[in-house]
Image (cartoon, grey):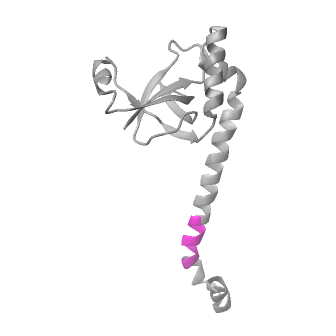
Amino acid sequence: MYILKIIPIANGLPEKYFSYFSKDKTPLGELVEIKIKSRKIFGIVKEIKDLKEDKINIKRHKFALRKIERIVSPNFIAEKLLKSIDKVSLLLGGDEGELYSSYIPISFLESVVERKDFKKRKENKKEKEEQNFGKKALLMSQERRFAKYK
């Protein structure tokens, strides 16, 4: 298990980073969906720690870690760009999450999610059609059934 330090892409949050856990090791700069209170927002993976290494610090926390909702887009931001945004936030004295939210529009993030969901729905539709072919094949003529399996 891994502990992820995630930068939320939203304005007006009390913290700069939030800690979540994941079973899989996710690369830096990955776009994930996280839940803060009852609101689902996007976040970018800033840091990854192995649970074995950071176990003592986790026991000291007064709060429980949450699991990330899902991985939206792998390799969304390159590591070099991630480091440069970190430096810019230090120079400007602002939060990294606010920088991300000002440069990456929410509509773009939502379109990435919709595109990915559309591909999944399309794949599921093809699978269902192939499963239903056996039922429909009984109603088809013999020539059409043989044409399908050639």
Kindly report the secondary structure that dominates the magenta region of the rendered protein: helix
Of residues 41 and 7, the one drawn nearer to the viewer in this rendering: 7
63 w.r.t. 142: above or below: above
Residue 103 rendering spot, x and y as whole percentages: 72, 23
Does the stretch in magenta take in 99? no
Q: For the magenta stretch, what is the residue range?
A: 127-134
Please give the name of the residue rendered at 56% of the width and 65% of the height, measured from the top-left corner. Answer: 128
Q: Is residue 37 visible?
A: no
Side of 41 relative to 24 (left or right): right
Of residues 78 and 22, the one drawn nearer to the viewer in this rendering: 78
* Residue at the extreme top of the image, as rendered: 93
Assign the N terminus to one quadrant of the image: top left
Of residues 92 and 11, the one drawn nearer to the viewer in this rendering: 92
Residue 149 rendering spot, x and y as whole percentages: 61, 84
Assign the C terminus to one quadrant of the image: bottom right
How many numbered discs? 0
Residue 132 rendering spot, x and y as whole percentages: 56, 72
145 w.r.t. 42: above or below: below
Residue 145 rendering spot, x and y as whole percentages: 63, 86
Does the stretch in magenta take in 128? yes
Please give the name of the residue rendered at 60% of the width and 18% of the height, measured from the top-left corner. Answer: 96
Side of 76 relative to 5 (left or right): right
Q: Is residue 52 visible?
A: yes
71 w.r.t. 95: above or below: below
Please give the name of the residue rendered at 31% of the width and 17% of the height, measured from the top-left corner. Answer: 62
Please give the name of the residue rendered at 53% of the width and 16% of the height, measured from the top-left corner. Answer: 16
In the figure, residue 76 lies in which quadrant?
top right
Side of 6 relative to 98 (left or right): left
